[in-house]
Amino acid sequence: MLGKPRRLAILAEGSFTVLDGKTAVGVLRYRPEEVAAVIDSTRAGRSTEACVGLGGSIPVVDGVAAAAALGADSLLIGIAPQGGELPAAWRGAVREAIERGWDVLSGLHGFLADDPDLAARAAASGARLLDVRRPPTRRPVAGARAAQVDALVVLTVGSDCNVGKMTAALELTRELKTRGVRAAFVATGQTGIFVADHGVALDAVPSDFVAGITEELVIEAAREAEVVLVEGQGALRHPGYSGVTLSLLHGAAPAALVLCHPSARASMRAPRRAGRAAATGEPEPVTPIIPPLAELVREYEQAAAWVSPARVAGVALNTLGLDEAAARRAVADAARETGRPATDPVRFGAGPIAAALEQALAERRRHATAP
Amino acid sequence: MLGKPRRLAILAEGSFTVLDGKTAVGVLRYRPEEVAAVIDSTRAGRSTEACVGLGGSIPVVDGVAAAAALGADSLLIGIAPQGGELPAAWRGAVREAIERGWDVLSGLHGFLADDPDLAARAAASGARLLDVRRPPTRRPVAGARAAQVDALVVLTVGSDCNVGKMTAALELTRELKTRGVRAAFVATGQTGIFVADHGVALDAVPSDFVAGITEELVIEAAREAEVVLVEGQGALRHPGYSGVTLSLLHGAAPAALVLCHPSARASMRAPRRAGRAAATGEPEPVTPIIPPLAELVREYEQAAAWVSPARVAGVALNTLGLDEAAARRAVADAARETGRPATDPVRFGAGPIAAALEQALAERRRHATAP
């Protein structure tokens, strides 16, 4: 991962759950063979499978030393907190890993390599601090150029943050490859970058250039692929992140969208306050409701059409927490409500949406070669 | 300006026109008493009034030495090029200013203080390099908190970039103050910051925090003001900047919008390619058309409503290039097409829109105090 084969210790202290340990879960799902251990002293002694349903018997341990004993040689920061700073309680583990000469892989907004204390320790031990969220220095401005590539560009969009947009894109990439389609995944967030070893964390890019960087990534991926699957970010109705979503939608200029939604969620996860006390008498953040899926389909298609038309090709549900029968009902309901194929790509496979994308690709080619 | 009274030399070499010298024009319109000269050797010998219709007899000169002879003591970079780097041809003038000990005020994306050569020269001469686009280090995530302030929050939005959103907000602030309303201007771009001595250049903020920073600025301004006028950025249909626009719309959570449009423009100004040769065989940027104003009104109101409802309270036209009769016709047409009051706030005054905002403020108070 990121330069060489690794045996990772994933730091998820106090947070190794499906909802809070998003990065840890993504790496366990897609690159489990590189994980030696997960560090969470509050869950030590259990397996990763017992904690998050993934990774089989990979052990959860109480610290860096225990991970080292299991052969770990790199530390990966396994959470992506709002605000993006290294939690103070984690500094000790990061220092210990650096002093052992381990590279530290981080997707935090606060760059480890810019921390004088950590940088000095890394210089002394030969460890490298790999901040995957550090934005590129180029400053391209998007011009709807991605709308013109031959490949079918697909963007995953969502009803909220942390709903499975990366997972849906990765599952569709895998499924399309299985079907013999040259499919490429474009990572736009830190976990996706750890999984794909390539990409840009768009949320850290200066806002003027988010669409431009996305456009570059899509054009690059489209040189080799027939279908380009772009990992979405945020949500059009999210008060904090909607702009990132729209930059991505207009920069990638996709022809197809896949709408992602966790069945059990009726309202967005409330934004936490970053750096302010609640006692200031200032307004409190709201918790927006999530509208019906058919309404989201309309909104995303409208917003795309401001630059280039796109059609929602399918709905990817996350049915976590529902039993099998309820999950199948949720999938059937989503298909009926939206008139698009639906599935939980993790639980039931990405087949129905992949088939719709194959059909969209075939239609695209017919149009391209029509006399 | 920015810390002390100044006599500015505005650097606009080869670009001192209304369209290219946006920052120069903004400072000349709102703080002309601080401008000693404009530097543009291709137009030297003329007055600023002759070049851009503003500033009266302020002279255009051919270099830093000529500006110094007119009493200049600071250099202000007067353009905001796409990509945002200091043009190579301008380095000599910047160096010369620094060596004279002048502060340099810059709104470029490339920070002058991060340029080792310029920073070393500034350290030697005592000059300060004031990069107003440097983003704050705080990382707030927006939570629709600005929707809850008592003040009437007004955001200027547009059919394209560079259409007069800052100017409309400043003219409305001035007009409302004349009418006895406590109005505050929130600057969100480099020129607005030069004019207001306060604000954040949102286009340089990491995309995750643009809405959050906007929310902070609005809540801060609303502590003292009855009406908060927020300078808009970009356009919802601009392929490169739409995300900045949506972040601002959802972060400011305004109750009223003012739609800004240059009458003579039928399509957006084409994005220039930043850092790539046209000869690569890659797709070229498109030049999007601008839809009818009534359609833009609908789109902005829809996009606002995803987080908090807003109504377009008026249309601010820029009728530059039209004769008096044609300008009056354009204003009447815009009012008829949209059903909202319209004016060219620079040419005909901001009165009609200011009156609509006063009315919206009065209605807001009636609702707040209703039994």
Image (cartoon, coloured by chain):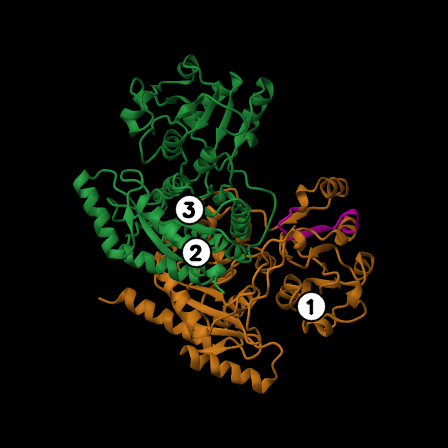
Chain colours: A green, B orange
Q: Is residue B141 magenta?
A: no
**Residue at the location (55% across, 80% down)?**
B348
Which residue is identified by label 1?
A: B17
Residue span colored magenta: B96-111
Report the mark closest to the observer, 2 or 1. 2
Report the mark closest to the observer, 3 or 1. 3
Q: Nearer the viewer, residue A32 or A50?
A: A32
The answer to whether dots 2 and 1 both sit on one chain is no
Q: Position of residue B98 (x, y in %)?
A: 76, 48
Label 2 and label 3: CA atoms lie apart by 17 Å
Q: Chain of mark 2?
A: A
Q: Position of residue B334 (x, y in %)?
A: 47, 79
* Circles 2, 1 touching at the beta carbon (< 8 Å): no
Q: Secondary structure at mark 1?
A: loop
Q: Position of residue B8 (x, y in %)?
A: 71, 59
- The three-letter code of the residue at mark 2 reads Ala
**Residue at the location (68% across, 65% down)?**
B33
Which residue is identified by label 3?
A: A233
- The three-letter code of the residue at mark 3 reads Gln
- Relative to residue A45, is residue A137 drawn left or right? right
Q: Chain of mark 3?
A: A
Crowd band around label 1 with a 10 angstrom C-alpha radius: few (<14), some (14–19), many (20+): some
Q: Position of residue B339 (x, y in %)?
A: 40, 79
**Residue B218, located in which quarter of the rendered image?**
bottom left
* Circles 3, 1 touching at the beta carbon (< 8 Å): no
Label 3 and label 1: CA atoms lie apart by 39 Å
